[in-house]
């Protein structure tokens, strides 16, 4: 098992879902984790879970699309634990379900500001800490929707694709500084619809769940992943076992981007 004893990690959007699983996994592997989210109660619950398991964690509320809040998050992590070693840019929003001509410009901008802008800002403020110590690891959570086109998700697809190429670009600029930057593209992950759930009624929840389960069933592995399976990939990329990996785009998608989908689940 990869160990991170003595390391300090920031995980954005870690109040729920994939981010929560990443924070728990890093803490379980010995890291001191700064949990961050706009949902204060959820973030504090993640911290409590880590503490209950004997780990070390602190919470910093932050909207990563706001420069001052992103900077405060990184500086708070460094001042609380005396340094920073790992940044996981996980915070993101979906942006609704519509074709581009139906999308409100402000809604499109908001998705880009949070997903891409948050990745940019947190990385911007973390990199000087990594440069000072001559080492650092950034793992960006992108999406398979950044690799392929997907129906009715123009802002989300665009923002995640941009994160993928920003990952490559940062790897080019900072490789000689021993800062490794990689990205993970999750596919269908069983997060119980995550933050979307609170905005949907019971019928919409049932429809969305059925749609996701049907789509996941058509992938080569035929199921949704658990958030912990994405967290395992983060631990690998942030650890010494991936010491010669930077600019890599790793899919955790059950094989969905490897094959043409004919529209019918396998028996």
Image: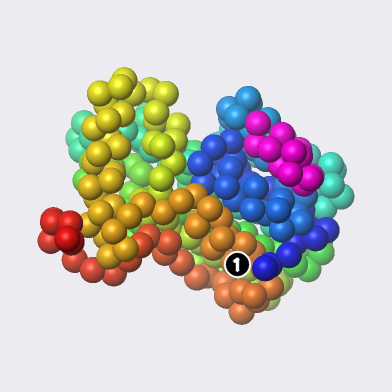
Residue extending furthest front?
267
Residue extending furthest bottom?
244
Residue 78: in magenta span: no
x, y percentage for residue 11?
63, 46
The part of the chain drawn in magenta is 45-58
Which residue was labeled with disc 1?
A: 236
Which residue does the image show at 71% across and 58% down from the upper left? 29
x, y percentage for residue 162?
42, 54
How many marks do you count on the picture? 1
Find numbered disc 1 in the image and state the secondary structure of the residue it sits on: helix
Report if residue 68 is visible in the image: no
Report if residue 183 is visible in the image: yes
Crowding around mark 1 (Cα neighbors within 10 Å: few <14, some 14 to 19, many 20+) is some
Which residue does the image show at 13% across and 56% down from the upper left? 264
Task: Determine the image quadrant of residue 133.
Answer: bottom right
Give the side of residue 197 with respect to residue 98, left or right: right
Image quarter where the N terminus lies is bottom right
Which residue does the image show at 50% across and 56% down from the upper left? 230
Along the line of sight, which residue is nearer the eye, 151 or 167? 151
Give the side of residue 134 with respect to residue 139, left or right: right
Compared to residue 87, the image places residue 154 above or below, namely above
Task: Determine the image quadrant of residue 93.
Answer: top left
Compared to residue 103, the image places residue 131 above or below, namely below
Which residue does the image show at 46% across and 66% down from the upper left? 250
Query: What coloring was used for the rendering?
Result: rainbow
x, y percentage for residue 82?
87, 50
């Amino acid at each position: 098992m990869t160990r991170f004893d003595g390391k300090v990690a920031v995980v954005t959007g870690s109040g729920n879902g994939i981010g929560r699983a990443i924070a728990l996994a890093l803490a379980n592997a010995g890291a001191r984790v700064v949990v961050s989210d706009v949902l204060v109660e959820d973030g504090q619950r993640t911290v409590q879970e880590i503490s209950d398991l004997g780990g070390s964690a602190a919470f910093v509320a932050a909207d990563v699309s706001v420069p001052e809040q992103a900077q405060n998050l990184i500086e708070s992590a460094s001042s609380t634990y005396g340094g920073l070693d790992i940044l996981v840019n996980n915070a993101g929003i979906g942006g609704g379900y519509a074709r581009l001509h139906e999308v409100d410009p402000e809604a499109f901008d908001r998705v880009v500001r949070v997903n891409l802008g948050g990745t940019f800002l947190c990385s911007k403020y973390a990199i000087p800490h990594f440069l000072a110590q001559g080492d650092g690891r950034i793992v960006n959570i992108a999406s398979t929707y950044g690799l392929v086109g997907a129906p009715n998700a123009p802002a989300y697809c665009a923002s995640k694709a941009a994160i993928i190429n920003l990952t490559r670009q940062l790897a080019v600029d900072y490789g000689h500084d021993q800062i490794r930057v990689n990205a993970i593209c999750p596919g269908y992950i069983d997060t119980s619809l995550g933050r979307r759930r609170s905005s949907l009624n019971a019928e919409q929840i049932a429809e969305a769940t059925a749609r996701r389960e049907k789509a996941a069933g058509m992938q080569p592995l035929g199921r949704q992943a658990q958030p912990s399976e994405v967290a395992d990939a983060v631990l690998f990329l942030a650890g010494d076992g991936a010491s010669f990996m930077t600019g890599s785009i790793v899919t955790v998608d059950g094989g969905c981007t490897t094959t043409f989908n004919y529209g019918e689940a396998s028996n």
